[in-house]
Amino acid sequence: MSNSTWRAPFIVIEGLDRSGKTTQTANLYSRLQDEGIQTSLHKFPDRTTAIGQMINAYLCSTSELDDRAVHLLFSANRWELASTIEKTVSARTPVICDRYAFSGIAFSAAKVHSGNGQPLLPFEWCRAPDVGLPAPDLVLFFDITPEQAKARGGYGDERYEKEEMQVRVREMYRRIGEEMGAGDAPGKTKWVVIDAGREREVVQEEVWNLVSPLVKRGIEGPLRRLWV
Ligand code: NYM
């Protein structure tokens, strides 16, 4: 990163539950530290803020919230951190987020009416509150089949951790990825599907090969905005 128009990258790790996303994110973070690259790591939902605590109670089923209300809380939880993300990359510290706006759309748009199985919230409605958030330079989507998730011991106890839901979430991520495009054009978010069903070390290497050049080289030009 040689002159003032360069900044650090903003990288998002997305994925299905049981895809190994959190482990891989932690591994990436410590490998960057080992190379002497200080990185700012965030996780969404950020359960530490007041909004995050409401989300946490909902996910743990200790509270009930309207589907629209909780969707907006997830988005507000990102907006709480938007200016921090911007300032951090401008100060040339890379930002890595475990989940972001794509989770917000995928999980909410995958919800269906219990009676007739019809979508509860339109896709575009789900995307709207996140329009204008800082856009990542790179998204790694950790993909895993429901069969592989089952072989890994199945899902946990939180809301959404059910096979039928995860199948629909996977389909939503596919749609989001398609709409993002391959993103190889300069200045566009690059969306990469990672086959997370492989050995942990293989996935780790692929992640490193995608992230480390970006982090070492930096990005020219300002952070962009999502979907504007
Ligand atoms: N989730 C996460 C959403 O439904 N909307 C969002 O905007 C975000 C960021 O929360 N099942 C869901 C996906 C997960 C759950 O995430 C908690 P994690 O990574 O298991 O803590």
Image (cartoon, grey):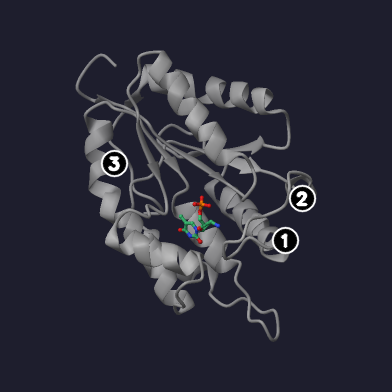
Q: Is residue 124 above or below residue 33?
A: below
Name the mark on residue 163: 1
Q: Is residue 120 above or below residue 140?
A: below
- Can residue 182 be seen in this snapshot? no
Label 1: how many Cα within 10 Å (few below 14, some 14–19, many 20+): some
Mark 1 lies on a secondary structure that is helix
At label 2, the amino acid type is: Lys
The residue that appears at 47% across and 20% down in the rendered structure is 31
At label 3, the amino acid type is: Ile
Q: CA distance from mark 2 to mark 1?
A: 9 Å
Label 2: how many Cα within 10 Å (few below 14, some 14–19, many 20+): few
For residue 191, which quarter of the picture? top right
Coordinates of residue 212 in the picture (x, y in percent):
47, 20
Q: Disc 3 vs disc 2: which is toward the camera? A: 2
Quadrant that contains the N terminus: top left
Q: Which residue is mark 2?
A: 150
Sequence order check, earlier mark of 3 and 2? 3
The residue that appears at 33% across and 43% down in the rendered structure is 224
Q: Disc 3 vs disc 1: which is toward the camera? A: 1
Q: Are marks 2 and 1 in contact (CB under 8 Å)?
A: yes
Q: CA distance from mark 3 to mark 2?
A: 35 Å
Q: Is residue 50 above or below residue 111?
A: above
Q: CA distance from mark 3 to mark 1?
A: 33 Å
Which of the two residues, 225 or 205, is positioned nearer the viewer here?
Answer: 205
Q: Which residue is mark 3?
A: 85
At label 1, the amino acid type is: Glu
